[in-house]
Image (cartoon, rainbow, N blue to C red):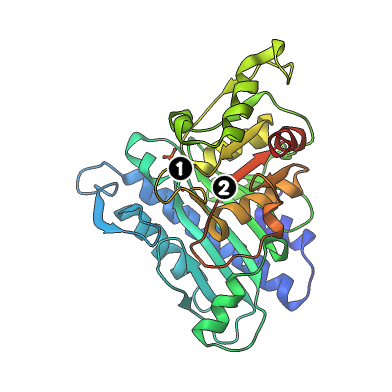
Amino acid sequence: MNTTLAQYLSRSIERNSVGLAVKDTIICLSQASKNIAHFLSKNGLLNNEMGIQTGDVNADGDSQKALDVIADHEIIKAIANKDVAAYFSEEQDTVLLLEQKGNLIVCADPLDGSSNIDNNISVGTIFSILPRKNDSFEIDHITNDALQPGVNQLASGFFMYGPQTTLILTIGNGVAAFVLDNDEFVRMDWEPKLTHNGNQFAINMSNMRFWSQKARDYIHKCLDGEEGTFAKNYNMRWCGSLVADAWRIFREGGIFLYPEDSRKNYDTGRLRLIYEANPIAFLVEQAGGRASNGKTEILSIKPNAIHQRIPLIFGSKKDVANYENQ
Ligand code: F6P
């Protein structure tokens, strides 16, 4: 008999008020993910041109698609009137205040990789759940609660909408993977682990001319294969959806890199600390891997703004250490 997400959470989470709130929030997010998967499946059908641009750009300057907005609304609908005090979204400029007495803070990238939607390539919803730190419902105070280092996360994960709708989740005691089967998330036999070294690297190679010398030297060593410093033949993969690239790294090991580069607005990388890097880093560390900005652990970094970008390098410990020591 397969373990459902609800059964897994009931068995694994502490039965105190915060634990129960985390459980409830994850179940609500899983409900939102089912609706998002449904909307995605309609994209491109007559009268359902949801991959179209809304004409707006989000807080991070990416052009917004109708489905980004739909995914954002689904999450808000799911976590409203629950134990969540505030929602921070990559699609919104500022915080959305929810329950004044809520114990939790939710941060999310509602539809990661959305530039891939019209090409039917996997996209996903990334989330991070943090504890509320102060009672004030003032915007400045509650925003400070989103700026906790990632090590404080109570849970994180991502839903991926691909051939299957899946979830990789951590509540701080390892990582579990689930697949949607008949409207129910059930646990997969596979347990994501990053304890072995991989032979894959994932990076957008078209940016090579903008990289630092460190990033260039590292990738050159990967390309040198068995004859080179790493004495290993690497394979390269790049989906352009963080969730899809991350899933593959969890399955096969190796390294993902989105380093800083010399393009305008890329000097601190592309990916967002609280919506993307922190939740992925929590999963990675819980799976026995390492996530870094190239120098320090992602989870130890105190965010300075809700839309802060950060270089993100994660994967098998040795591969990431090789990059850091470059
Ligand atoms: O942050 C959005 C995102 O689409 C990630 O999912 C992905 O890893 C990255 O951007 C791809 O960036 P680029 O288009 O520069 O390769």
Q: Quadrant of ligand 1?
A: top left
Q: Is residue 138 visible?
A: yes
- Of residue 10 and residue 175, the one placed in the foreground of this image is 175
Q: Which residue is mark 1?
A: 262
x, y percentage for residue 240?
Answer: 46, 37
Q: Quadrant of residue 177?
A: top right
Q: How many marks?
A: 2
Residue at the extreme front of the image, as rendered: 213
Q: Is residue 58 left or right of residue 138?
A: left
Q: Residue at x 64, y 45 (%)?
A: 178
- Of residue 289 and residue 18, the one placed in the foreground of this image is 289
Residue at the extreme left of the image, as rendered: 47
Identity of the amino acid at label 1?
A: Ser
Quadrant where the C terminus lies?
A: top right
Identity of the amino acid at label 2?
A: Pro
Q: Which residue is mark 2?
A: 311
